[in-house]
Image (cartoon, grey):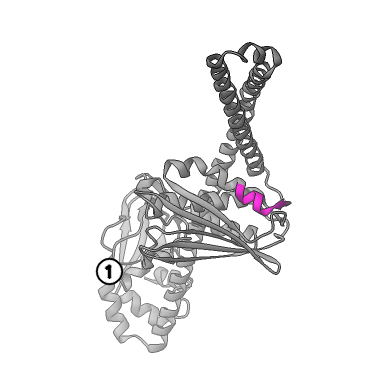
Amino acid sequence: MSDSLAVLQKISFFQHMNDDALQSLLDVAEQVTHTSRSVIVEEDSPANGLFVLINGNAQVSKHDDAGNEVEIAILRKGDFFGEMALLDAGTRSATVTATTKCDLIKLNQDAFLQWLANADSRATLQLFAALTKRVRDTTERVLQDELNKQALESEMQIERHRALAQMVAGVAHEINTPLGIINTASNLITNRISGGEIQAIVANDRRTRRKVEDIEEAADLIQRNIERAHRLVQNFKKISVNQVTDTREPVKLVELVDDSVDLFRINARKSNLNTSIHSEVNDNAVWEGYPASMTQVIMNLLTNVERYAYTVMGGDIHIKLSESGESFTLTVQDFGAGIAPENLAQVMSPFFTTGRSKGGTGLGMAIVYNIVTDVFAGTIEIQSAVGEGTSVVINFPKQAPEKHKSIT
């Protein structure tokens, strides 16, 4: 077992133990051999001890959500795995397969606990310190992997928004052409009917005059709605272009909020939502910030109200704007279902959602949080009570910091 002792002496997990302590540990362990391509431990199987690789190579793999086997690491001489099984008889988190002939030391839990009962207290403390560090390092690695995964998901969400924004801008541009033609035709009808020749013909014919008046009223209705559609298309184009290339610029905050809410009007009518804006801010008040990001925040908040607050009959949404010193405050309030206390702390966590079946991804509020805190350098607070509704209060400076990458 001299080779085994030499290997253990080089492993950080055991390096603080003297030769006698290591030898006593080896005395209660067993040496096992695995041929190439044989499975040493299998994912989800009962965990029964620590393995140390004395000779050979092995592959660590794990199944992903789709059931595909993914390689995680390659183990070589001196590597070890399964240390948590010394204390917790759970299940294996991954599969380890020999890629060459492998000689291993196996220390099962019962043997380890027996050794621990007779071991020197100093050796025991050092071993537990090493085990704690190993667990901490593993936890940090898993956390970093999860953060990287969330960052990738957020980036994919951003790219989808950008692609959609480009498509909307293109559609809006195309819609402008037929709107212009309709507007020209409507003006032609109005001009011809209001001309002196037509008016003279119908002056003494009451019945015909009423028909002409109906046509005039219809033409006026067409023109007013064309103007409304044109404003809406312009808003789509303006916001869509900003979504693709959002830069810091001075904007009238009240107008920006009003334009953003206008984009939600169709959804609001469909869901029987009454959306009102209460502004204590001067109509000409300027915010030096990122208009597309603000639109994204407002749209996400309103969509959340539509999806979660009023699920049956619809209701009211109050949007309030106020200012104090060098900051603005935007409040979006509903009077619907509210948020359960156990969910309130998780609402802004990535991928947390109670509405997966309703199309929720768990990214909406996480994106809002990132925009408010990172892009606007502001704060966000959620106040809610079950059955009474929810208020989202966003406080942000009148000048957003420069050189932030907007999250759209």
Asked if the stretch drawn in magenta spans residue 292, the answer is: no
Q: Nearer the viewer, residue 339 or 54?
A: 339
Left of 291 or right of it: where is 337?
Answer: left
Residue at screen point 34% across, 85% down: 119
Q: Residue furthest bottom?
A: 121
Count of numbered marks: 1
- Residue 160 shows in the view: yes
Few, some or many C-alpha atoms within 10 Å of disc 1 (few <14, some 14-19, many ≥20)?
A: some
Q: Position of residue 339 (x, y in %)?
A: 39, 62
Left of 43 or right of it: where is 11?
Answer: right
Query: Residue 231 is drawn in which quadrant?
Result: top right
Q: Is residue 115 above or below residue 293?
A: below
The residue indicated by pointer 1 is 89
Q: Position of residue 24 (x, y in %)?
A: 34, 80
Q: Main secondary structure of the magenta part?
A: helix
Q: Which residues are magenta?
A: 251-258
Q: Nearer the viewer, residue 156 or 263?
A: 263
Give the quadrant of the N terminus: bottom left
Q: Position of residue 44 (x, y in %)?
A: 29, 57
Q: Nearer the viewer, residue 140 or 352?
A: 352
Q: Is residue 260 above or below residue 348?
A: above
Residue at screen point 39% across, 78% down: 22
Report the amino acid beneath label 1. Ala
Q: Residue furthest front?
A: 204
Q: Position of residue 185 (x, y in %)?
A: 64, 18
Asked if the stretch drawn in magenta spans residue 257, the answer is: yes
Query: Residue 139 is drawn in which quadrant?
Result: bottom left
Left of 347 or right of it: where is 218?
Answer: right
